[in-house]
Amino acid sequence: MELTFNIISLIFDDEPTASTLLHIAIFMAFFWGVFFAIANPIIAFIVREKQWLRTSSDREYELNREVYKALGLNFESKDEYFEFNRGFWPNMQLIIFQHIIGGSLCLPSVLGLLDDSTSSSLACLGIMSEIGWEIQDIITMVYKRYFLPHGEILVPKALFTINLLHHSLATVLGVPLILRYRNLKVMHWICLDLQAAGALGLGVSEYTKLLDVTIPSQLLQFQVLTFLTLVLLIWTRIFHWFYLMGNFMILWYDEKAWTFLIVGTIICGLFTIFSVFVIIVPIYNKFKKFLKKKAEHQSLPADVDDKTKRGSLLMLQEVAADVHKNTNFDDILALFQNGTEVTMRRTMPPSSTLRRSSMMLLTSSEMRQVMRRIASEKKNN
């Protein structure tokens, strides 16, 4: 109880010190780490028999079965693939929840709902929440990469670097900015934009996986949600982002805060590159491809043969499934490309050293790269 009161008093301190913010960051890292560890298995248990998740998994299995077979990832049944796929789902929902909480804490400030002191404290807590989550995420990546067997495969250098880049903005700039600009609404807006857009993008991605685009009503949902997500990402990660960061840079220049200006410009430039080329451009290109395939499918003659119609529907499902993948690491992780086929059951290390939970940082695309790298190592040995 005393710890709780101490943390609350630190959060609402109008004149925080670096030590104060460090304590809050450590607390938030611990809080989110424990929360994820407890909530993850609970969610997995709750959804274990949910038909909508099973239907989505079965559809994904059907779409990717031949690809998996070609790579030697021999899931022997839909049940096996469902158990494998189900391990990834809860963690993503918790990340969405964490982003929603962090972004929501900024709303009182940007909407002017409370007094400046309280609203600024809450907004700064939103920033510290993000910093805390990113600290525990970095610790998790470091642990997996350097302390688990096959760590360099679980968390490849490119993936490790990209995630560090993604975490750099809040982790490096967050505390110094709060110390100097605690009440600045521009900073609160940035926190809201990035966390809210992240939560929405991930949320839409997860929801659209459940949609069957061969059903007209669900096809419409997919198009509308994807379009709105793309618009929001372009606004928050490009237009509003440049406006807000421009305000910050002008402020730093006027105050002759050269360290902030130099470091902030570098980090913001790197983060902009990440946002544009790893998030927005891939989603735009994939959505454009989806619209093209949809137009081709809808232009089929009414008397087209069943085989052609089924092939068109399958292609539509495939490109739809590809739209909301968080990023395409196939090119980034090209160093793992080789022609070795690999069988899941024969190449996976023992569950005690490489459990499903150890793969939470990887998408299915990276998983294929992992399997091939392990197979290549075994072949070389």
Image (tube, rainbow, N blue to C red):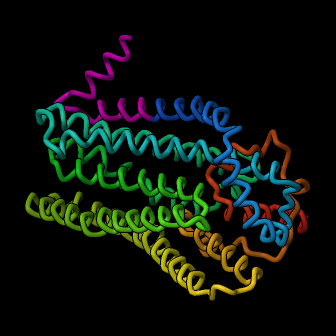
At 42% from the left and 65% from the top, the residue drawn is: 224
Magenta highlight: main SS: helix
Relative horizontal placement of residue 332, taking residue 197 as reference (left or right) = right
**Which residues lie in the magenta part?**
1-28
Vertical position of residue 2 compared to residue 366: above or below: above
Instruction: Return the x and y of residue 47 as percentages of the image width and height.
Output: 65, 38
At 23% from the left and 57% from the top, the residue drawn is: 260
Is residue 13 covered in magenta?
yes
Instruction: Return the x and y of residue 306 as percentages of the image width and height.
Output: 75, 80
Relative horizontal placement of residue 78, taking residue 293 as reference (left or right) = right
Is residue 330 covered in magenta?
no
In the image shown, does 378 or 43 lie closer to the viewer? 43
In the image shown, does 52 or 187 lie closer to the viewer? 52
Quadrant assignment, res 12: top left
Q: Residue furthest top?
A: 1
Relative horizontal placement of residue 266, taking residue 274 as reference (left or right) = left
Instruction: Return the x and y of residue 109 as percentages of the image width and height.
Output: 18, 42
The N terminus lies in which quarter of the figure?
Answer: top left
Q: Residue furthest front?
A: 303
In the image shown, does 131 or 279 lie closer to the viewer? 279
Residue 78 seen in render: yes
In the image shown, does 127 or 343 lie closer to the viewer? 343
Q: Residue furthest left?
A: 254
Vertical position of residue 118 compared to residue 158: above or below: above
Vertical position of residue 259 compared to residue 26: above or below: below
Task: Give the mark count.
Answer: 0
The C terminus lies in which quarter of the figure?
Answer: bottom right
Instruction: Return the x and y of residue 26 as percentages of the image width and height.
Output: 42, 32
Residue 146 seen in render: no
